[in-house]
Amino acid sequence: MSRRAPTIAWTCLAVLLIAGVLPVGSQQTETGPRTFVDDLDRKIILTHTPRRIISLAPSITETLFAIGLGERVVGVTQYCDYPPEAQAKPKVGYIHPNLESIVALQPDLVLAPREFLRGEVLGKLEQLNIPTYVMDAGMIDDVLSHIRTLGRMLGALDAADELAGRMQKQLEAIKARTAMLPRPRVLYVLNSEPLITVGPGSFIHQAIELAGGSNIAEPSRVAYPRLSMETVLKANPDLIIFPSSVVERGSEGERQRWQRWATLSAVKQGRFYRLPNELLNRPGPRVVQGVETLARILHPDTFGERDSR
Amino acid sequence: MGVVGLTRGRWVTAIVTLLSAAVLMLIVCLRFGVEYIGFTEAARILVHTVRDGQVSVGTAGPAGAILLQVRLPRLLLGFLVGSSLAAVGVALQALLRNPLADPYVLGISSGAALGATVATLLGLGTAAFAVTALPLFAFMGGLFSLFVVYRIAASYGRLPIHILLLAGVILNAIFSALIMFITSMMEPNRSFGMMAWLMGALTPPTYSTLAALAAYIATGGIILLRQARALNLLTFGEEAAASMGVEVEKTKKTIFFTAALLTGAAVSVSGMIGFIGMVVPHIVRMVIGADHRLLLPAAALVGGVFLIAADTVARIVLAPGEIPVGVVTALAGGPFFIFLLMNRKTSPIQWRD
């Protein structure tokens, strides 16, 4: 092990140098092992362009389909419901992925999200010599860089660059349009009792800021803080947003529950909204749609009213 | 020993002292919160409210609502929950003559938690009647658990204490497994909220809810207090108690059901808040003795004070975020209990027969 480490390091270095020097157009004809470093700083060596890919997160599945690699996906989680074709793929579990199913599908690459991936699962996959690339999409920029990385890794660079470039333009456009607007104060309700919301460091917080809002949990030091009603009353949000999973069975109930906080500007003006939660809970290509939907909710005059009350 | 030494004067002195301490703690905790409200402003708000004869939030800005709709009801809820958990702990420890007995050991709490989990799974946690559905299911879960434990023990004729405890332990294991199963089946988003509820949380209630809960808990408390003399005698053992005129089985049933009803109510409004029912009775017993006529109300007062203090820590330590109050009670109560165990003189185990 220790004797081989320098050899591997030198190989990596060599590969990196060559990859840096060579023109990138040769992606389809690439031969020989290529090395990638994942978000856990692990090195993954791919001897060929992967053809049988298992995705362990809905966001990763969406990304693969979005860059035209849906056919190569051989296994997904039970929550991978978008695009609809993904639902037909074999399921391998999510928080507790089934290692037997994974091995049986003979993948040449497993793409795993950092959250929820347990150390022993990763260890087992390594032991089984299944290349496993761990992705940590904490921020929206990570989504774009992940799309590009997957394109490079899987020989779909053009499609990935096109997608990431388009997303970046759309995000910048939203940012530009909201830059001069007043920023309404937002409370995003992940859970009502106890009240849990999103803080800086969470993906959704970033989306709210991008869409031209001001998250009332901004001063919190935690990604998903429990918030006191005291803070909410003091901060006085202009609007309250629920992910659709929280309200799908009773948005009326949620609304009523909040009526007793009559001093809140959001309650006075009846500004309760729901947001399809898969748009922003998944750090994948539909994030832009999520930010757009948020922007329409926050700034109906600028982005056009959308009936999501 | 305490049984002999209790005079009316000492009872009144102890209760008045503890009551004053509780009121003082309430005032102090009312001062602390995520949002700063100075004493003069708080006083002004209180005076206005008393003068208008109603809880007015009005146009006075958020301070009034924060003080009177969030902080005060939450403190009062904490006091009620802490009191009932501690009183139930005293009664169960005496009844089962087991220093570890508390609502958790008998599986009542986990039964209530299972009920709440099922309610959430069915989507009732967010429906229009969520305010009643979750506590109701929790309450029914607690009752169901009580029923099962009781039936198992009753099948032995009388209610053998070791069977009660054993049945409670087994039920706990089964219910915990079911809760884990249900949580693992939920979408990650929803299981997240469920776990947060299970960790214990005091959500500011409305005053009508609070009044109903107070009436309910007071009734339970009075029933327990009326059994104080019987509890005193039961600590000498069931046969001894019976020979001194205690209707042992009837007393056991009364206390057992009252304890379950009180616990069900407490868990349904606050989730799983551990250690109060176990630790507070021991501390109070060490200080004021084992006469249940004093021990029950004293432990109830101390339990209430302990929980509002713990909840105040939970509210402000990570401000503006909060931490689960169950974490604070366990971290404060657990080490203290270990300290008592390690010190032979104070070890609660000696108290047993």
Image (spheres, coloured by chain):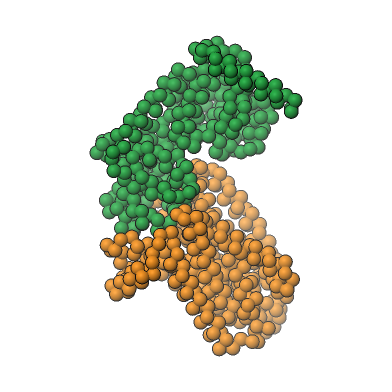
Chain colours: A green, B orange
- When asked about the image quadrant of residue B92, the answer is bottom right
Q: Position of residue A302 (x, y in %)?
A: 26, 36
Say if residue B107 shows up in the picture. Answer: yes
Q: Quadrant of the image for the C terminus of chain B?
A: bottom right
Instruction: Using residue B163 as the reference point, say whether residue A169 is left or right of it.
Output: left
Query: Looking at the image, how many numbered discs can be counted on the residues?
Result: 0
Q: Where is residue B305 in the image (x, y as percent from the top left)?
A: 52, 70
Q: Which of A49 and A242 is in front in this view?
A: A49
Q: Nearer the viewer, residue B66 or B230?
A: B66
Q: Where is residue A87 in the image (x, y as percent from the top left)?
A: 48, 29
- When asked about the image quadrant of residue A273, the answer is top left
Q: Quadrant of the image for the N terminus of chain B?
A: bottom right
Point 57% across, 50% down: residue: B179
Most extreme residue toward the left, as rendered?
A301
From this view, report whether residue B108 is shown above or below residue B93: above
From this view, report whether residue A308 is shown above or below residue B110: above
Instruction: Using residue B261 as the reference point, say whether residue B340 is left or right of it.
Output: right
Q: Which of A273 and B231 is in front in this view?
A: A273
Point 66% across, 21% down: residue: A10
Say if residue A84 shows up in the picture. Answer: no
Point 54% across, 21% down: residue: A153
From this view, report whether residue A202 is shown above or below residue A17: below
Q: Where is residue A64 in the image (x, y as percent from the top left)?
A: 49, 25
Point 58% across, 20% down: residue: A16
